Amino acid sequence: MSLRLRLTFAATLLLALISLLGVFLVHSVGSSELQQVDQQLKNALPVAQTIGAPAPLPFHPVGSSQQTFNTSRISAYYIATITYGQRNVISTPLDTGRAAPQIPHVASTSLRDIKIFSVGSTANSLRWRAVLFALPHSHTDMLVAVSLAQIDATMSFFRLAFLLAGLVVLAVVAATGFWIARLGLRPIAEVTEVADAITAGDRTRRVTMVRRKTEAGKLALAFNMMLDEQLSLEVQLRQFVADASHELRTPVSVILGITELWRQGELRNGEERDEAIHRIGVSGNQMGKLVEELLLLARLDEGRLMDRVRVDLARLIQEVVADASTTDPHRIIAVKAPGSVIVQGDPSGLRRVVANLVNNALRYTPHDAAVEVRLSVNGDTVMLEVEDSGPGMTHEEASHAFDRFWRADVSRSRSGTGLGLPIVRSIVVAHGGDVTLQSDSVAGTRVMVTLPCGQTVSSEPNVVAVRLID
């Protein structure tokens, strides 16, 4: 059963219950009014009997001595005697005109067993509450009746008021149902339509009727956010494949070109063959490095846990800086770190983090720019900072620094695959840390890595090591 059908059923049931309640109230009020009229008839019957009897009769009011009747109000009753079918009217209410009640078909013979009936009029539609009482020791019956005009008017007004109230309730329920269907269920239906459209291939469809304050609106908003995220992931995946293909195209083209030259017999002397083999080796190494980095990112994206052992991060930094100084002996790299900082992590992954940050600082800054590596401990957090004094990046470039295959040099003439910082971020996140980048086109670039600290042992606080090899 659909939600719309269930809401319709609930609204119908509610209206049915309200209708039953209204009928019960009308019936209860009518019964209460009739009981009051019947009690008035019972109280007036002895007086009417005294007035209409051919001979004086003892007066015995029904009930206790406290039940009295005001004889001055006897004019509000229709009183008549009936002898052999002939009606002799004694009293007629002024507000009934010429109307007279019909004669009940059963006569009461005792004041203790009075039978009261609702009868119509002989001349119009006026209703009466009447009692036909047989006078003792005579052939005469007495008819006492009370007009129900006031009660009928009251009940008609009550029924009309209830009908109007019912129409108001019906209008409110209909408006509420329309509001729920339009504001509540319409977004859900639109979510279904959008899902069908996306399944059919339209990836740009979104839910337009979004009201943030309703549950259905929040569902539609979450659905739109999910679709946007999915589309963004697809765009990133296509861009990732395009960038990977671009990076692999150059070394593959070199290898295929050299192979074609070899097949045509162009590489005949030893120097040409050696140069060709060297270029094939360089291209192969470039392809192998790119594939290795892609596999590492794939494993990190899958959430595969890295090895967790005790790693001395201060010593690891010293080793990475020593290796960097060996490959680039003309650069100045300053290290400020405690003697020993122990963290739980993967040694090769943390080494790659430090190496990528240091190599980026050396690769993308002038030879006279200083590079500084700082390591500090603040409570249960380790802070690794790599800062250079070379020309940094603009704000727009810095916002894309951790995007895969992105490089500020759009011509891609500079070496590198554009995966260094993305790998750094993936490894740091896998260790439960965070990495941020601050860059200025004049002041330089600073990358800050925070990692949870396992245990810190500092033999020489604030050790400063400066590597300068010339």
Image (cartoon, rainbow, N blue to C red):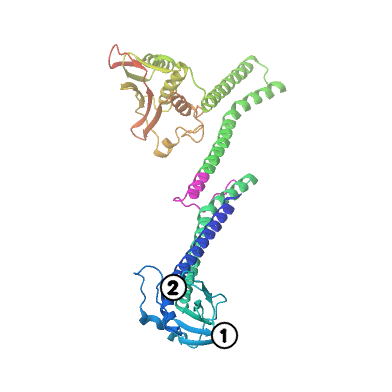
Check disc 1 and report its element: helix, strand or loop.
Answer: loop
Check disc 2 and report its element: helix, strand or loop.
Answer: helix
In the rendered view, does 284 fall on the left or right side of 366? right
Task: Return the disc, 2 or 1, that comes first in the chain's sequence.
Answer: 2
Q: Quadrant of residue 353?
A: top left
Can residue 202 be seen? no
Is residue 166 positioned above or below 281 on the image?
below
Residue 237 lies, in percent from the top left, at 56, 35
**Quarter occupied by the C terminus:** top left
* Disc assigned to residue 192: none
- In the image, which residues are magenta? 203-224
* Disc assigned to residue 42: 2
- Three-letter residue code for mark 2: Lys
Q: Relative to the observer, which residue lies in front, 458 or 399?
A: 458
Q: Relative to the observer, which residue lies in front, 398 or 114?
A: 114
Disc 2 vs disc 1: which is toward the camera? Answer: 1
Can residue 298 be seen? yes
Q: Quadrant of residue 49?
A: bottom left
Q: Relative to the observer, which residue lies in front, 191 or 328?
A: 191
Is residue 3 positioned above or below 406 on the image?
below
Residue 23 lies, in percent from the top left, at 51, 64
* Disc assigned to residue 85: 1
Residue 77 lies, in percent from the top left, at 44, 81
Residue 150 lies, in percent from the top left, at 44, 77
In the rendered view, does 468 fall on the left or right side of 194? left
- Disc 2 crowd rating (10 Å Cα; few below 14, some 14-19, many 20+) is many
Determine if the magenta segment contains residue 222.
Answer: yes
Q: Outermost residue toward the front? A: 137
- Three-letter residue code for mark 1: Gly
Q: Which residue is located at x 57 percent, y 38 percent?
A: 234
Determine if the magenta segment contains residue 74.
Answer: no
